[in-house]
């Protein structure tokens, strides 16, 4: 349990299959899929019976997005960008409807690297829980908020050139400082401070120069 009504869990197989079916195009005429994968785990928000004024759209309160953001800080995975849906049940608990969420396509692998671990460990889930319950995404410092926006928006871009510009803009938002009485160019700040940031985080940098032709 991450927070009140928010869980990292495994859904019953029949509900898992409903979500898969709702999120994937079946083709016409319908062709039953033969999947070579199963459910690892699910981030679920249990909203209970809808009341007057309840936002019932997918992640209308942004709780799931916050969990995904926290999990990316701990260990980047494709969770949250594969199969998303709102499941609606009747008064007796019987399934009625599945509404697919918006996160499909190339965004699924935006935060994961091929041949690397694409799941959260139990200890990482505890760290995510701590971040979720002790952070407020609406009160981030301005430069952190701008960096976060660029980072998230980059995941939804198909073209590498656009992604690169957004990631660079996010890094620049983090490292750029306006100091009264001292003028240091944006380019100089970026080239020196990103190197320092990489050193602090243990990130290896690669310098590459292509052929002139």
Image (cartoon, grey):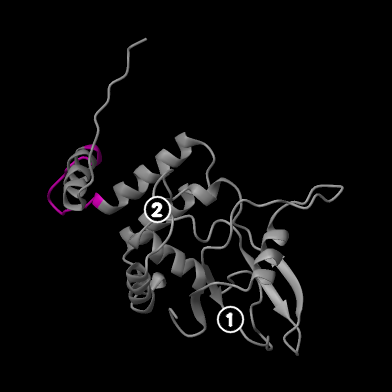
**Near-viewer residue (53 or 4):** 4
Q: 192 left or right of 144?
A: left
- Label 2: few (<14), some or many (≥20) within 10 Å? few
**Near-viewer residue (39 or 23):** 39
The quarter of the rendered structure image containing the N terminus is bottom left
Q: Which residues are magenta?
A: 175-187
Which comes before the other along the chain, label 2 or label 1?
A: 1
Q: Residue at x 45, y 69 (%)?
A: 67
- Numbered mark located on residue 14 in the image: none
The quarter of the rendered structure image containing the C terminus is top left
Count of residue discs: 2
| Mark 2 secondary-structure assignment | loop
Percent coordinates x, y for residue 18 in the rendering: 71, 66
Q: Which residue is mark 1?
A: 46
Distance between mark 2 and mark 1 Cα atoms: 28 Å
Percent coordinates x, y for residue 116 in the rendering: 39, 48
- Numbered mark located on residue 117 in the image: 2
């Amino acid at each position: 349990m991450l927070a009140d009504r928010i869980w990292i869990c495994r859904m019953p197989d029949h509900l898992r299959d409903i979500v898969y079916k709702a999120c994937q195009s079946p083709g016409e005429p319908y062709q039953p899929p033969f999947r070579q994968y199963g459910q690892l785990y699910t981030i679920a928000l249990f909203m209970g019976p809808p009341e007057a004024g309840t936002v019932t759209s997918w992640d209308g309160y942004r709780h799931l997005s916050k969990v995904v953001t926290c999990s990316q800080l701990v260990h980047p995975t494709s969770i949250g960008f594969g199969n998303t849906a709102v499941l609606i049940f009747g008064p007796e608990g019987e399934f009625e409807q599945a509404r697919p969420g918006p996160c499909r396509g190339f965004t699924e692998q935006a935060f994961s690297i091929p041949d690397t671990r694409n799941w959260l460990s139990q200890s990482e889930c505890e760290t995510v829980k701590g971040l979720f319950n002790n952070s407020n995404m609406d009160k981030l410092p301005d430069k952190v908020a701008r960096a976060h926006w660029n980072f998230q928006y980059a995941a939804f871009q198909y073209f590498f050139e656009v992604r690169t510009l957004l990631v660079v803009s996010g890094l620049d938002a983090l490292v750029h400082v306006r100091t009264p009485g001292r003028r240091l160019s944006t380019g100089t700040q970026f080239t020196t401070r990103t190197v320092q940031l990489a050193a602090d985080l243990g990130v290896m940098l690669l310098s590459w120069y292509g052929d002139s032709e």
